[in-house]
Amino acid sequence: MVDTSNHATHSVVTLVPLPPRVRDIMICVAMESEASPIACALGLGEPRALRSMHPARVREGHVAGARIRLVTAGLDAATHVDRVGPIYAATTLLHALAIATDATRPDLVINMGTAGGFSAQHIGIGDLVVARHTMVHDARVALPGFDALSRAHTRLSLSTDMLASLAARLDATIGDVSTGSSLDASVEELKQFASAGTMAKDMELAALAMVARDEDVALASVKAITDLVDQPELASVSFLRNLQRACDRLGACAGPMIEVIAR
Ligand code: ADE
């Protein structure tokens, strides 16, 4: 499907819409600091390995009549840090979907996590952004067709009405989230974000959208802001200072988000 509404220069793939009844939700989160307040707020069980000898972890529970699985990519054995970034996000989701049976296939994948925000878009630290579109900002392949492929510009699954309901309930802003492999941003990328009106920048969402395209599964996302990409402070400094605050916000919005979506 091609959506030419407000991104006329790119081809935009629209994901499958939210099914009428959402009863099985897989929440994908990159970092343990992000996952832990969400698991606590939703009353999920202890983390267990998604599969024996695999680093990815899953916690399970039920909220508002929906089965919830919270999946994290787990820790890297060599560096002992969370396996963040687009590649681990995609491989972990694909793995989680591959081991699900027909009966345990999720109706919806929700990506929750932290992101950099843009003060030019009136976003502040601790704010929530509900994603409408996502794309890859650090892919440059100047070949016809391959450029659009590598940017993977995607309209996520929530309808305009559902985005508005969620934004109202969560006190969040609706906007486009751009994904790359770096925490910081180059001068060229800053220009790109400004002209595209990007609301937030992360390291997972577009990669999850690429998997959702292939797997025909609905995808939604909410991001909590730890740093302001278009301000002079180093992203890494602001990120560490505001991580707990942003993660607490994610935890607080998880239940209301599921209640709105699972109706
Ligand atoms: N997560 C939190 N802040 C981020 C940033 N500035 N870029 C990418 N991912 C982030």
Image (cartoon, rainbow, N blue to C red):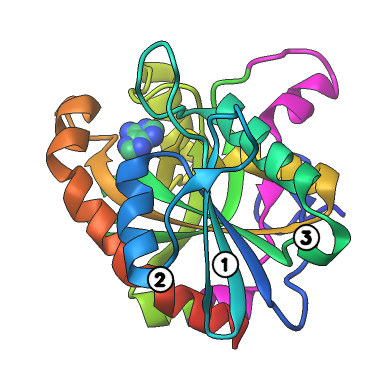
Q: Amino acid at mark 3?
A: Arg
- Among the 4 quarters of the image, the one containing residue 65: bottom right
On residue 42, which mark appears? 2
Q: Secondary structure at mark 3?
A: loop
Q: Is mark 3 within 8 Å of ligand 1?
A: no
- Placement of 166 over or under 143, stated as above or below: below
- The answer for how far apart the CA atoms under marks 2 and 1 are is 9 Å
Residue at position x 69%, y 44% from top? Answer: 96
Q: Residues within 10 Å of mark 3 (few under 14, many from 20)?
A: some
First in residue order: circle 2 vs circle 3: 2
**Badge 2: few (under 14), some or many (20 or more) residues near its Cα, within 10 Å?**
many
The image position of residue 205, as x and y in percent, is 56, 43
Residue type beneath disc 1: Ile
Relative image position of residue 202 (x, y in whole percent): 44, 38
Q: CA distance from mark 1 to mark 3?
A: 11 Å
Q: Please, what is the three-letter code of the amino acid marked with disc 2?
A: Leu
Mark 2 to mark 3 CA distance (whole Å): 20 Å
The correct choice, above or below, for 220 with respect to 169 in the image is above
State yes or no: discs 2 and 1 in contact (Cβ < 8 Å).
Answer: yes
Q: Is residue 151 magenta?
A: yes
Residue span colored magenta: 140-165
Q: Residue at x 33, y 75 (%)?
A: 171
| Corner quadrant of residue 235 | top left
Residue 262 visible? The answer is: yes
Going from the N terminus, do you reach mark 1 or mark 3 first?
Answer: 1
Q: Which residue is mark 3?
A: 105
Pointers 2 and 3 in contact (C-beta within 8 Å): no
**In which of the image's four quarters is ligand 1 placed?**
top left
**Closer to the camera, 146 or 242?**
242
Toward the viewer: 8 or 263? 263
From the image, tell me which residue sits under label 1: 68
Q: First in sequence: mark 2 or mark 1?
A: 2
